[in-house]
Image (spheres, rainbow, N blue to C red):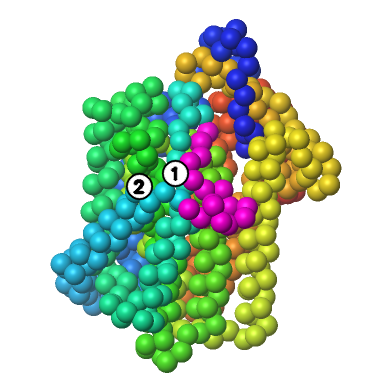
Amino acid sequence: MAAPQEKRSSEERKHKSVPNGAQKSQGQWGRAWEVDWFSLASIIFLLLFAPLIVYYFIMSCDQYQCSLVSPLVDLLLGNTRLSDIWDKTPPLTYKAAGIYVLWVTFQVILYAFVPDFCHKFLPGYVGGVQEGAVTPAGIVNKYEINGLQAWIITHVLWFANAYYFHWFSPTIIFDNWIPLLWCANILGYVVSTFAMIKGYFFPTNAKDCKFTGNFFYDYMMGIEFNPRIGKWFDFKLFFNGRPGIVAWTLINLSYAAKQQELYGQVTNSMILVNVLQGIYVLDFFWNEAWYLKTIDICHDHFGWYLGWGDCVWLPYLYTLQGLYLVYHPVQLGTANAVGILILGLVGYYIFRVTNHQKDLFRRTNGNCKIWRKKPEYIECSYMSVDGTKYYSKLMTSGFWGWARHFNYTGDLMGSLAYCLACGFGHVLPYFYIMYMAILLTHRCLRDEHRCFCKYGKDWERYAAKVPYRLLPGIF
């Protein structure tokens, strides 16, 4: 929530004590230094079972028409064995491997070797070379913001193929969905393992590394803050935004094409899912420069949590609604469709306006108007590893005066709309809203712990001014 950081006098830059009563020495903010037993147990659980959860959901659709209960019932009653389920699971194929390698390579080329040109002709879009936030070591990284460009190029080629070239079927993703899952897992584990090795032996910036001494925690949560190859290839920005999020809308389009192939029409529920999730994806890339100041980039280190998560968890579980609608097409009544559309758009409005208010406040250092009034804020300070003291402001006006994470509230409304579009026939498409509620609540708590470590008593003053985290009057 911080506004742009400002360096003050040389005396302040040399100051080494911890500001405002924070309990650890400089550099405490960011990922944890120590691991408690609950965190370790949670991490081991995720490392063991998260890949199985993804497989179980996708297998359930492939073999049990998206029923999450039927596989367990069959196993408990002895109607089937694990080996039977596994034998029916499509294996890794050369075709899927070729598709996946080509896809990732293409996205690497678009990310690393094609400078952004969209900012030169799209009014209001911020692209090209941009600065990130200050890291715990006091480093300010530069990024080539070109995600919108990559998304546009990719989708232009997709539609050109679908309507003109016919190099491959628009259903290619759905038709190879499980073999592609094995490819995504391989990349996720390879990049996560490489990031850990790199953090030990050739980190990009040693001062921005954190070692807890616990292998499992370091592997999952990451050691390096911003692992890079060369000047521009930043692992965190690439895997957070590409290839998973660029693929998100393509995956949904492939689902819609499969629905057309199977049933001769695309239902209004599938259209709603494509439109609402497409808005979310486009918003991400339009505001990619703003994304540099979010928790993913500003606080998280790069490990399995982001590496595997962005390769596997995001593209496979964030698109469950479209996958479900291939197996169970739903044609909504007009009133229901309109209501779901309004819910999704209102959620997006809250999400976007809340983030816009923070971004405007940050860019102008508070010299702006929020809801036609000069914004109120709490002044605060923090220190980097090198002892440099920075000053910042935490806004308490607009939506940020309603709750400390009101943008998450809008995000949850949009997530609920995606799920409601699928009707109430199965629980599977509602996994997304349940997961997002847990994720964003946990993120609230995690972010606030880091903010307290970063700002100390200034954060306590801010929390007293804005007492609610997510839902005004409730939580």
Q: Position of residue 333 (x, y in %)?
A: 62, 86
Q: Quadrant of residue 256?
A: bottom left
Q: Position of residue 345 (x, y in %)?
A: 65, 66
- Looking at the rendering, the stretch of residues picked out in magenta corresponds to 117-133
The residue to which callout 2 is attached is: 112
The residue under the point 36% across, 26% down is: 205
**Residue 13 visible (yes or no):** yes
Question: Residue 122 versus residue 399: which sits nearer the camera?
Answer: 122
Q: Is residue 413 above or below residue 472?
A: below
Q: Position of residue 240 (x, y in %)?
A: 42, 49
The residue under the point 37% across, 87% down is: 261
Which badge, 2 or 1, is on the more N-terminal residue?
Answer: 2
Identify residue type, mark 1.
Glu
Residue 125's tag is: none
Do the residues bearing badges 2 and 1 touch, measured as CB atoms within 8 Å?
Answer: yes
Q: Is residue 368 above or below residue 32?
A: below
Q: Is residue 162 magenta?
A: no
Identify residue type, mark 2.
Ala
The residue to which callout 1 is attached is: 144
Q: Is residue 271 above or below residue 152?
A: below
**Residue 462 visible (yes or no):** no
The residue under the point 41% across, 75% down is: 159
Give the Cα separation between the discs numbered 2 and 1.
Answer: 8 Å
